[in-house]
């Protein structure tokens, strides 16, 4: 389980001041406390699924600063397609939650699924922790994980929004989320395979590219990493015919090249450069040389 939490949400969201900042802090703190466990229970567990979920919910909640739509809800009055059959239903069942649950019928349906009486207590849908569960339930019902697995942000957006409103912001937030999750995964990998732990025997004895440190002593890198180690990685990738820029910035292009190299060489294609990927690159560059 990737340990996403309130800090992850802060890394993705825009910065506000005053009352919006206070509202954002409350939502992020409460939702972040149960974020990893809730996502895990809905199989939103890998980098792409988590990133798309966080990118979309960030946009739908105006940067995690509200779990209730700004409009009054009057425009939903009399909307039988939403189950709004009684006077006042439009405002009573206005959009609430991280993905804006709307309409009496949906409040009844999702409330029943989650064991909460949202029909008689509609404002509960705006509580951050519950709104997170509602969003995950929507995600599951609309099979959005499959679109995440293809990294298809337009398909994800259409299922969440019904169109492509705010697409550029959704892309931006999703990219930020990918970086944040990759950082967490790199930390996990580093902890699981520290330099002092035993790497596979073949890897330990594998040749190292000239001038390079042994694989076990080089840092774990992922999207968002910067510095000399990234420069070394990019040079190795270029030596094995990946046309990446050598700029010391582990961005999308480097991540794609790493993932492809891993896939082509029987490694876990996660875009994270740990001891096995370093060793594989060393061996590959020796063959090219």
Image: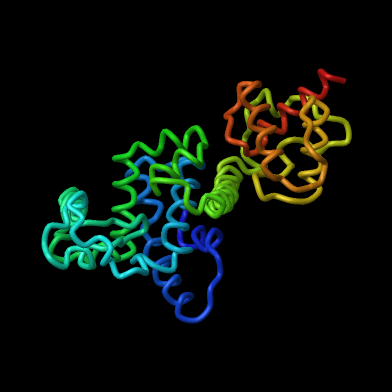
| Image location of residue 3, percent across then percent down | 47, 52
Please name whichever residue, 50 or 36, is drawn nearer the observer in this view of the structure. Answer: 50
Query: Above or below — where is 28 with respect to 214?
Result: below
The reply, left or right, for residue 57 in relation to residue 208 is left
Q: Residue at x 34, y 64 (%)?
A: 128
Q: Residue at x 36, y 55 (%)?
A: 99
Placement of the N terminus among the 4 image quadrants: top left
Please name whichever residue, 233 or 93, is drawn nearer the observer in this view of the structure. Answer: 93
Query: Above or below — where is 76 with respect to 186?
Result: below
Using the rendered view, name the quadrant where residue 215 is placed: top right
Q: Residue at x 67, y 42 (%)?
A: 252
Q: Residue at x 80, y 32 (%)?
A: 236
Please name whichever residue, 281 or 174, is drawn nearer the observer in this view of the structure. Answer: 174
Placement of the C terminus among the 4 image quadrants: top right
| Image location of residue 251, percent across then percent down | 69, 45
| Image location of residue 158, percent across then percent down | 42, 43
């Amino acid at each position: 389980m990737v340990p996403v939490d309130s800090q992850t949400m802060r890394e993705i969201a825009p910065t506000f001041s005053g009352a919006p900042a206070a509202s954002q802090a409350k939502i992020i703190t409460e939702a972040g406390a149960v974020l990893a466990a809730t996502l895990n229970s809905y199989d939103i567990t890998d980098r792409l699924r988590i990133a798309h979920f966080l990118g979309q919910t960030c946009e739908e909640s105006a940067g995690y600063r509200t779990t209730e739509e700004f409009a009054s809800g009057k425009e939903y009055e009399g909307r039988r397609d939403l189950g709004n059959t009684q006077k006042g239903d439009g405002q009573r069942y206005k959009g609430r939650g991280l993905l804006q649950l709307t309409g009496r019928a949906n409040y009844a349906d999702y409330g029943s699924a989650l064991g909460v009486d949202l029909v008689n207590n509609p404002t509960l849908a705006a509580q951050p922790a519950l709104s997170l569960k509602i969003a995950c339930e929507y995600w599951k019902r609309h099979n959005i994980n499959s679109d995440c697995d293809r990294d298809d942000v337009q398909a994800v957006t259409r299922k969440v929004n019904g169109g492509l409103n705010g697409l550029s912001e959704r892309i931006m937030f999703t990219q930020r989320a990918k970086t944040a999750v990759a950082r967490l995964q790199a930390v996990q990998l580093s902890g699981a395979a520290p330099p002092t732990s035993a790497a596979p025997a073949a890897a330990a004895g594998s040749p190292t590219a000239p001038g390079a440190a042994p694989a076990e002593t080089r840092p774990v890198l992922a999207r968002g990493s910067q510095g000399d180690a990234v420069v070394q990685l990019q040079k190795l990738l270029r030596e094995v015919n990946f046309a990446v820029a050598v700029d010391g910035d582990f961005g999308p292009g480097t991540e794609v090249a790493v993932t492809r190299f891993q896939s082509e060489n029987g490694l876990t294609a996660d875009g994270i450069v740990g001891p096995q990927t370093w060793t594989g690159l060393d061996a590959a560059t020796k063959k090219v040389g």
